[in-house]
Image (spheres, rainbow, N blue to C red):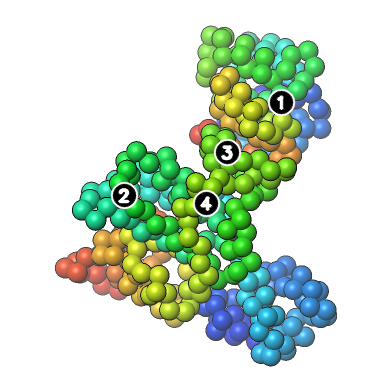
Amino acid sequence: MKNVLVVDDSPMIRRIAKKILEELNFKASEAEDGQKALAAVASAMPDAILLDWNMPVMDGLEFLVNLRQMPNGAAPKVLFCTTESDVKHITRAMQAGADEYIMKPFNKQIVKSKFEEVGLC
Amino acid sequence: MSQAFAALQNFLLKSSGLSLDREKQYLVEARLNPVIAQAGLNNLPELVARLETDPTLAKKVTEAMTVNETFFFRDRAPFEGFRKAILPELLEIRAQRRRIRLWSAACSTGQEPYSLAMILDEEARRLVGWSVDIVATDIAESVLKRAREGVYSHFEAQRGVPMSHLVRYFTKRKDQWAINQNIKARVDFRQQNLMSDFSHLGVFDVIFCRNVLIYFAPEQKRDVLARLTRALAPGGYLVLGAAESVIGYSGEFKPHGENRVILTRRGPGETAPARGAAV
């Protein structure tokens, strides 16, 4: 079973995302901001990260830049999952090393489609 | 089975070839209740009673019952097969003519032909000097209107579309995503009932006819497959849906390599296996 880290400051989004991921046969864990997510990946690198953009303490983009510099940090597939839904943000995410991009609101079909896109579904 | 359901079955079989079996009764309610309400009617028997005399209503019923779910790059394998197997082969086979014709039959709201158009755009360097036609048809004008507009909801635009394609081939308009003009211009949308003669569309190198034949009764399936065969150049490709097969309905096709959903039309010298054998 593949591990996915859900990084979002909203407990409700984390709960919905975890439920969908578990239905798709992933094992999901949570972090509520970029800094806590960095600590989480330092102890166990997941197979994928579902990443919010706007979060307190450390936002998603800063987390991604830090992640990609870590040993094994290139390994996990990173899928942004954010309300930012313009071409400018998607392009910045791609340049920073994101593998896919989900625009909120999302549903199970979109999550499945994007995880298929990165080869994990 | 109610009399109204039986009459509806009969009407749909004649008007569109749709074989509505009893297990699909749930579809009737879900799809026809809005039509019943819109027409100011109360129930299915009232609707069925008006089908003979009200062609506009009859058209709405056909459209409501035949519109099927679709999304970009649906099932992936047929599109990868098109990119990696069909297209390279056609580039060799058609090297003299330098023209390729594709048909997306029953294209619904346009995601399938636009997915093909995106692949052709990505492969543009190999297609310099080539002319590629994409004809896309559907029985329902309502979905063709949407297909021609090429504007998709937040959910539709995310399902099947990689982020790189979203950025490259779509433009955001408020909460929706519009397919870019260069992709839109590649597709020629036309109204076509597969039960009617479609020989005027010409001959194609590839026909995508996915998740359509499963709704046809056996006789209609045989008839449509025979006419699709004539619309396909010898050696041409027929791409079916994941759950579909021509076994028992046509001996004119053979599987293309390992890809189960891609078939090729047998050449004049190739004999078909005995009926019932694997295609």
Q: Which residue is mark 1?
A: A52
Circle 3 or circle 1, nearest the eye: 3
Residue B166 numbered tag: 3
**Residue contact between numbered discs 1 and 2, judged by CB atoms under 8 Å:** no
The quadrant in which the N terminus of chain A is found is top right
Circle 4 or circle 1, nearest the eye: 4
Front residue of A86 and A75: A86
Residue B184 numbered tag: 4
Query: To which quarter of the image does residue A104 belong?
Result: top right
Amino acid found under the numbered disc labelled 2: Trp
Q: Residue at x 24, y 56 (%)?
A: B97
Q: Which residue is mark 2?
A: B130
Amino acid found under the numbered disc labelled 4: Lys
Earlier-in-chain disc, 3 versus 4 = 3
Q: Residue at x 68, y 25 (%)?
A: A51
Note whether B190 is above or below A61 in the view shown.
below
Front residue of B277 and B29: B29
Q: CA distance from mark 3 to mark 4?
A: 14 Å
Circle 1 or circle 2, nearest the eye: 2
**Residue contact between numbered discs 4 and 1, judged by CB atoms under 8 Å:** no
Circle 2 or circle 3, nearest the eye: 2
